[in-house]
Amino acid sequence: LFCSPGGWQLSRERKQPTFFVVVLTDIDSDRHYCSCLTFYEAEINLQGTKKEEIEGGAEVSGLIQPAEVFAPKSLVLVSRLYYPEIFRACLGLIYTVYVDSLNVSLESLIANLCACLVPAAGGSQKLFSLGAGDRQLIQTPLHDSLPVTGTSVALLFQQLGIQNVLSLFCAVLTENKVLFHSASFQRLSDACRALESLMFPLKYSYPYIPILPAQLLEVLSSPTPFIIGVHSVFKTDIHELLDVIIADLDGGTIKIPECIHLSSLPEPLLHQTQSALSLILHPDLEVADHAFPPPRTALSHSKMLDKEVRAVFLRLFAQLFQGYRSCLQLIRIHAEPVIHFHKTAFLGQRGLVENDFLTKVLSGMAFAGFVSERGPPYRSCDLFDELVAFEVERIKVEENNPVKMIKHVRELAEQLFKNENPNPHMAFQKVPRPTEGSHLRVHILPFPKINEARVQELIQENVAKNQNAPPATRIEKKCVVPAGPPVVSIMDKVTTVFNSAQRLEVVRNCISFIFENKILETEKTLPAALRALKGKAARQCLTDELGLHVQQNRAILDHQQFDYIIRMMNCTLQDCSSLEEYNIAAALLPLTSAFYRKLAPGVSQFAYTCVQDHPIWTNQQFWETTFYNAVQEQVRSLYLSAKEDNHAPHLKQKVREKKRTLIVWD
């Protein structure tokens, strides 16, 4: 089905051989890239007979008549590796040997191909030959984690334009169905790969079928999100789909059904991304209105342009996910540590609680995979880890300076380009091609039957020769993942009024006046302090200051002090909703059972009795988060203190104490 997605059909014409790559996904979510080279050969039983019957029943000798009907035949190479140009050359060489009747055994070509050792990633090069006068080169990327795109991303923007590609980008991130159609199977493969690579560092985890056969069109009614490509022949069959975004690669349009609400990137990131893409794809736009424009700005060559576009999206994800590591939570109470992302804390601190785009992204399967893959604090790092940890502030500074922005984009593009092309001096390559017009020859013998036993025998010989070759493995360099700056608001609208040093000083002074029983000064500063508590920094300041007074054994309050502290606690807790970060409430929790007042001899009232009606206390996630954080702190203190302590008996005592503490928590 996948070798001939349009269906197996005889042809009356001698057609050119075609090549495209089909992607199949197995039950373990591993992808298999199937390169298909399809050519047409004459049907032998329709090539005529030595004798023909003519009118009158007489028989005369005749020549073999030219074939009138041709049947497709496919050579398919299946691999877990994605090297489409090498696969095209290898299959093309097998076809060339067949069609030009070269004196080379097809069995030896196939055996050499199957036994070829592919080097591990890390920029390794390998020259190889299938034994037909060819000289080919495999070039591995520096990092497996970075997608290899060639020119497919630049081609997608050329076909659909900036706005349409951004719409498709938002669609796949928010788990909508996306369908491409084109008259070219290879263009479908390239477009699907380009769209998926724009998601990096996220990985697409739903059905991904760049070329869908005609017999499987019912898959388009699947309830799950997908990225699928179909041939334009079936255009009329797909227009009835009501919940699918359809992109016409040949016409350059996309169709979004009315029932789909497509969430957009939050501002100002959307405008910045559009502007950056315009400057890269249309460099003349900025000077188009100048009375004396400079000489025409040349576009980068297509491979570098491809990487510049990808660099823009890398910068976008670095800004979207800035500080994500500060919201990762390592849960160590299971047999294996579990990494949990504190989504509500992230959204709350970024000021994007009501933004449906980022909320959908963080709730999606792609982000769940991102957390499990990139969450561990010790692993191999790549370009994105450095970008999100160290470069976000630089990106923000460049917002209003196009020259600096383009310079940074090109620096990133150079790194992406070097990942795919690590060796500037590529070795000379040569792959024989079929003679021009060979597919138009009148008489060509059918493709011969391959001797499978002979192929296996030759493969075993090649494997035996390669036994002494160094293993094609690469030791991953692991390191501590840089945490980068903490989460900051994406909108840059955190009011400096509430978070200024002066406002924090108001909160500190008010608390000091309360504990010093300066009632008049407290009454004057309390309204300003309550207003300041609308800001996160002031709320944090309150918990810090109250914690200091607990340490000083100043937790027993008189009635007036108790009322003032309760008012400040209530003001702080009213903003800790289920969609806000929980750190403040968690910090206040032990304080509510520390401060109390005497109502009568032997009767005490604790602060928690006056703050227990807030919705934060009924949120299950708050209690889980607080518990896991406490366990993490206990583990940290255990290991950090153990590292500094060299006395074994004392260390064992500490371990026993910590274990008891954890059991109490549980």
Image (cartoon, rainbow, N blue to C red):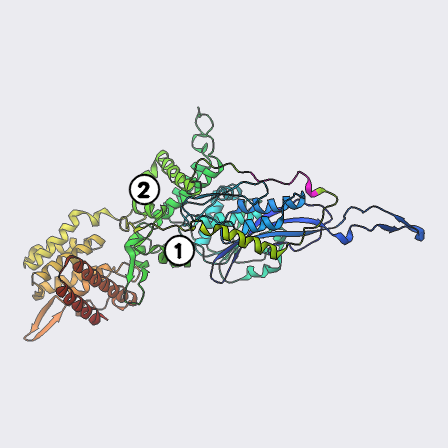
Question: In the image, residue 506 lies at what x, y percent?
Answer: 14, 51
Horizontal side, residue 228 vs residue 412: left or right: right
From the image, tell me which residue sits under label 2: 396
Q: Which residues are magenta?
A: 430-439
Towards the viewer: 194 or 432: 432
Separation (CA) of disc 2 from disc 1: 22 Å
Q: Is residue 431 magenta?
A: yes
| Numbered circle sitting on residue 398 | none
The quadrant in which residue 521 appears is bottom left
Residue 61 against residue 334 in the figure, above or below: above
> Outermost residue, right direction?
56
Horizontal side, residue 168 vs residue 431: left or right: left
Q: Is residue 210 visible?
A: no
The amino acid pointed to by label 2 is Lys
Quadrant the N terminus occupies: bottom right
Q: Residue at x 38, y 36 (%)?
A: 406
Specify the principal SS of the magenta part: loop
Mark 2 closeness class: few <14, some 14–19, many ≥20 residues within 10 Å: few
Horizontal side, residue 562 vs residue 39: left or right: left
From the image, tell me which residue sits under label 1: 361
Q: Residue at x 12, y 71 (%)?
A: 605
Mark 1 closeness class: few <14, some 14–19, many ≥20 residues within 10 Å: some
Question: In the image, residue 660 lies at what x, y percent?
Answer: 18, 70
